[in-house]
């Protein structure tokens, strides 16, 4: 009896511990190990950082050469003072890991197709295995490995990466389980060692985000449905060349560069007959754009250049950016860095400032592969059977056995779609992906070079290393120079090459080399007194190479319109310009919309909404209701015009500029007619009225819930990478939106805003919507967000060490060689 | 007297054992069991002193951390778990889980002594 009750108690105790020690299923996902998670000594409580914490430490580490001191200022920005360059990058790696380890690893797990390993093949609604398969088949790991081979040939850059990696690993090594970042405890896994390959994977992820966009399958499908004339009216080339980045150039291809356009291009290429739908698992945001501009001293109050940059990306917590000052006897640089990579990426040094916007060029195409048989061992290319190489991509799945993708590799690149990973329509065909990011490059060299750049020639040398993702690289110096170049390695394409799926059985449709670098123009100190870019078309359509891609024209146009009028510019003016919410689409469209709508057909409440729009100040400020009316009406109009013709899924939706252009200039735009009404022929007045009446229903519903003001309608938020609401900052009432200079959309927008005036003593300002700590239990996790939404900036300063000791700071870490 | 001795010992060792990084979170269950063997009490009293020892320890520990943290993290976790954002519930739940494991271990310890 006594023995039995002992055994019962023992089994109950062990069972209780067991249950608390495993992850229990909960609504499609899993709980943390509750016992561990709730333990104040081991679990999440350990991540709840004291709000008065002081970061004082003395750390001895292997691999350091000299002493490095790090002071944290009041915003937790580290100011790193190293005795040599490599120590600075080592300590940067350590600090990235100290404050952002989980994010760094998670981002590279995503890039390398390893999410199933930590999240399971499926969690809640998300198919992580599908995402992993997508990135593996896109050849992300292959691309990173190719770059690692290239890195091995560049001793100088490799040393920097090695030092950085050693710094990250030095932190990981001394990390005790109870100190693991919160997300590891939530998901129940451990950090692994960092490597140069992980840094390269992260950079490839940025390439995917910025140079991974294409609509080749969608365009091919559209080609099947429309005549050439219709196609060009839906997806025109160059009609958006409102105000190119490099205007008024005498545009001829460099001597010696000649295209061979395939002979049968009209009969073969422009008339594909099969319907194909893309695997749309992951599509980078079309609006991964940015603004940058630099104003020459001739236009500023101080007589010195001012450089501005705000890169638009998906806004997450922890933030993509980490602010830092790096100081060594060789250089001082300040700005934002990528947790996961060394160097300051966007920022300034003692002599110059620099920034980036995305070039938006299409550098990802598909080629049809003809395999000899189902074994895929050989494929046809230039009349020969080539041997296929295979990559084994092993995907670990949490709680399940591993799965392996055997990825066929061809002269084009990895075969993304075939019978084992079919496109949605199951054509049975195989499509290889040719992507510029597969070509090895040492992009990091550019940033390391810019951190130390003193003049325009240093800038030109530094950026020459940059291949993908192509960027509009802006630069300004204290000596008064301003410069802009669209830098990258771009395939030289003939008209519409790569807009559609291409035949791959020979090299006829292959990319024929790269655009010669001298045809990527460098704009230096132009007469108009400024250089700028907002992701618009870089050149007009007389540029001798085809500029496939998607180019939003409006921000670039607006920036130029304002800058050309401005004189005696101050940094405050520039901050105001970055915060400008003027809606130029509405400015142009409104007169026409109000003129053509049939007001007699509107009810009283609809007329009231129309008045809101008519009286609106054309600014997408958070309190404006007219902005919401315009957005609802415009979206409804776009549907009214195109939805009948584009009813099939998987077709590209026409750009805002296409609809606007048609509304303003084409009274007989063929798509205005509703093809589903047999007798009537609709005109602009009809579709404008019908679309407004439909939009009015949405508007009425918004008004009822008191959500009609722009900020409430847009409902901005900064989401945690795991999309956990509690770790996100949601429902931020904010200004701005798509096609405005202030490009803050719902979950996407300025990820870092910077204004640098290059006076003798640099006057710089900046802010990003996040916080320096990646720990949700730290008060620095989201400490910049409120100020960001309020339009505030922080002063940025390359602070000399002596001043730092006098200033109020949050602690000091001294690193020394072990 | 035995009750308080057991309670204090349970709390003290329940704090010390998991301090070592190689020890799992439930290391205190071992110490609570040991305490119940050494300081023998009848079943219910052993359970109660074992329970209260770690319950009070974790309660106090969580309250101290939470106060220093201004409740930033607990509020977020109390939404994830989900406890409707109640940090009080989260602190209580943490302490209760620790206490229950400890109490059960102590009960087991008390029964070991009665076998012989």
Image (tube, rainbow, N blue to C red):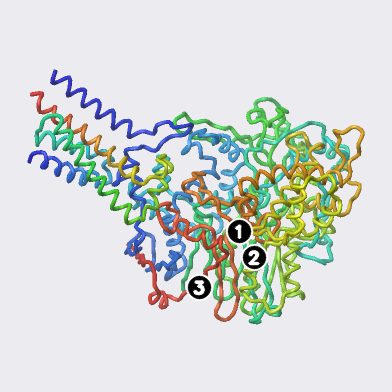
Per the model, the C-alpha gap separating discs 2 and 3 is 20 Å
> Of label 2 and label 3, which has the lower sequence position?
2
Query: What residue sits right under mark 2 in the picture?
Result: A578
A497 to the left or right of A304? right
Quadrant in the rendering for residue A283: top right
Pointers 1 and 2 in contact (C-beta within 8 Å): yes
Q: Tell me which label, 1 or 2, sits earlier in the chain.
A: 2
Per the image, label 3 sits on a secondary structure element best described as loop
Q: Which residue is mark 1?
A: A750
The spot of residue A430 in percent (x, y) is: 70, 32
Q: Chain of mark 3?
A: A
- The disc placed on residue A797 is 3
The reply to the same-chain question for discs 3 and 1 is yes
> Residue A296 has which mark?
none
Disc 2 + disc 3, Cβ < 8 Å:
no
Q: Quick check: can you spot residue A155?
A: no
**How busy is the neighbourhood of tag 3: few (under 14 within 10 Å), some, or many (20 plus)?**
some
Spatial CA distance of label 1 from label 2 is 9 Å
């Amino acid at each position: 009896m006594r023995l039995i009750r002992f055994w019962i108690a023992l089994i109950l105790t062990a069972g209780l511990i067991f249950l608390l020690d495993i992850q229990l299923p909960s609504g499609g996902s899993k709980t943390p190990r509750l016992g561990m998670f709730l333990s104040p000594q081991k679990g999440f409580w350990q991540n709840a950082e004291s709000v008065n914490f002081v970061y004082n430490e003395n750390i001895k580490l292997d691999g350091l050469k000299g002493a490095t001191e790090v002071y944290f200022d009041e915003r937790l920005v580290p100011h790193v003072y190293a005795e040599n360059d490599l120590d600075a990058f080592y300590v940067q790696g350590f600090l990235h890991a100290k404050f952002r380890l989980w994010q760094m690893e998670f981002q590279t797990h995503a890039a390398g197709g390893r999410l199933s390993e930590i999240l399971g093949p499926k969690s809640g609604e998300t198919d992580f295995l599908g995402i992993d398969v997508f990135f593996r088949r896109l050849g992300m790991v292959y691309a990173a490995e190719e770059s690692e081979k290239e890195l091995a040939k560049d001793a100088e850059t490799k040393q920097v990466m090695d030092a950085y990696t050693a710094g990250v690993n030095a932190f990981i090594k001394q990390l005790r389980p109870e100190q693991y970042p919160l997300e590891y405890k939530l998901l129940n896994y451990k950090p692994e060692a960092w490597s140069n390959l992980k840094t390269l994977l992260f950079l490839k992820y940025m390439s995917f985000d910025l140079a991974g966009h294409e609509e080749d399958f969608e365009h091919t499908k559209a080609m099947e449905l429309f005549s050439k004339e219709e196609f060009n009216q839906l997806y025109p080339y160059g009609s958006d060349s409102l105000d190119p980045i490099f205007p008024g150039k005498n545009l001829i291809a460099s001597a010696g560069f000649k295209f061979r356009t395939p002979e049968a291009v009209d009969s073969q290429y422009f008339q594909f007959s099969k319907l194909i739908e893309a695997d749309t698992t992951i599509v980078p945001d079309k609006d991964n754009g940015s603004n940058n501009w630099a104003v020459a001293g001739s236009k500023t109050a101080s007589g010195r250049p001012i450089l501005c940059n705000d890169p638009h990306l998906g806004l997450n917590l922890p933030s993509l950016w980490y602010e830092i000052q790096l100081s060594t006897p060789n250089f001082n640089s300040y700005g934002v860095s990528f947790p996961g990579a060394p160097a300051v990426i966007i920022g300034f040094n003692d002599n110059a400032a620099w920034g980036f916007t995305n070039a938006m060029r299409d550098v990802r195409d598909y080629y049809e592969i003809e395999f000899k048989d189902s074994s895929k061992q050989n494929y046809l290319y230039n009349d020969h059977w080539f041997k296929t190489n295979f990559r084994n991509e092993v995907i670990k799945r949490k709680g399940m056995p591993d799965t392996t993708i055997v990825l066929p590799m061809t002269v084009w690149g990895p075969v993304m779609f075939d019978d084992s990973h079919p496109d949605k329509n199951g054509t049975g065909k195989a499509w290889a992906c040719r992507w510029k990011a597969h070509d090895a490059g040492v992009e990091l060299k550019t940033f390391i070079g810019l951190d130390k750049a003193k003049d325009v020639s240093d800038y030109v040398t530094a950026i020459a290393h940059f291949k993908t993702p192509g960027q509009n690289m802006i630069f300004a110096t204290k000596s008064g120079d301003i410069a802009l170049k669209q830098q990258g390695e771009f395939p030289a394409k003939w008209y519409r090459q790569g807009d559609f799926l291409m035949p791959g059985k020979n090299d006829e449709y292959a990319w024929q080399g790269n655009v010669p670098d001298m045809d990527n123009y460098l704009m230096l100190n132009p007469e108009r007194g400024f250089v700028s870019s907002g992701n618009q078309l870089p050149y007009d359509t007389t540029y001798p190479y085809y500029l496939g891609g998607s180019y939003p024209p409006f921000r670039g146009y607006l920036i130029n319109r304002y800058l050309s009028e401005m004189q005696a510019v101050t940094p405050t003016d520039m901050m105001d310009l970055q915060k400008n919410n003027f809606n130029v689409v509405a400015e142009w469209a409104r007169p026409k919309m109000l003129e053509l709508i049939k007001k007699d057909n509107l009810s009283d409440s609809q007329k009231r909404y129309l008045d809101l729009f008519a009286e609106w100040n054309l600014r997408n400020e958070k309190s404006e209701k007219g902005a919401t009316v315009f957005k609802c009406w415009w979206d409804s109009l776009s549907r009214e015009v195109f939805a009948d013709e584009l009813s099939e899924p998987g077709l590209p939706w026409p750009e805002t500029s296409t609809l606007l252009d048609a509304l303003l200039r084409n009274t007989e735009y063929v798509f205005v007619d509703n093809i589903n009404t047999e007798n009537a022929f609709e005109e602009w007045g009809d579709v404008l009225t019908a679309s407004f009446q439909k939009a009015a229903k949405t508007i009425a519903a918004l008004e009822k819930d008191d959500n009609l003001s722009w900020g409430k309608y847009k409902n901005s938020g900064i989401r945690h990478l795991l999309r956990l609401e509690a770790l996100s900052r949601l429902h931020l009432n904010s200004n701005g939106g798509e096609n405005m200079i202030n490009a803050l959309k719902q979950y996407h927008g300025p990820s870092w805003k910077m204004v640098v005036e290059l006076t003798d003593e640099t006057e710089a300002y900046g802010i990003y919507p996040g916080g320096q700590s990646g720990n949700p239990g730290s008060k620095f996790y989201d400490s910049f967000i409120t100020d960001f939404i309020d339009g505030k900036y922080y002063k940025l300063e390359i602070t000399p060490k002596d001043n730092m000791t006098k200033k109020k700071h949050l602690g000091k870490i001294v690193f020394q060689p072990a | 007297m035995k009750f308080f001795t057991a309670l204090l010992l349970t709390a003290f060792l329940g704090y010390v054992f998991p301090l070592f990084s190689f020890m799992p979170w439930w290391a205190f269950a071992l110490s609570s069991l040991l305490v119940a063997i050494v300081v023998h009490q009848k079943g219910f009293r052993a359970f109660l002193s074992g329970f209260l020892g770690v319950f009070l320890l974790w309660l106090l520990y969580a309250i101290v951390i939470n106060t220093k943290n201004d409740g930033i993290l607990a509020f977020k976790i109390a939404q994830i778990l989900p406890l409707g954002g109640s940090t009080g519930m989260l602190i209580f739940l943490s302490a209760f889980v620790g206490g229950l494991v400890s109490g059960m271990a102590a009960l087991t310890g008390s029964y070991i002594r009665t076998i012989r």
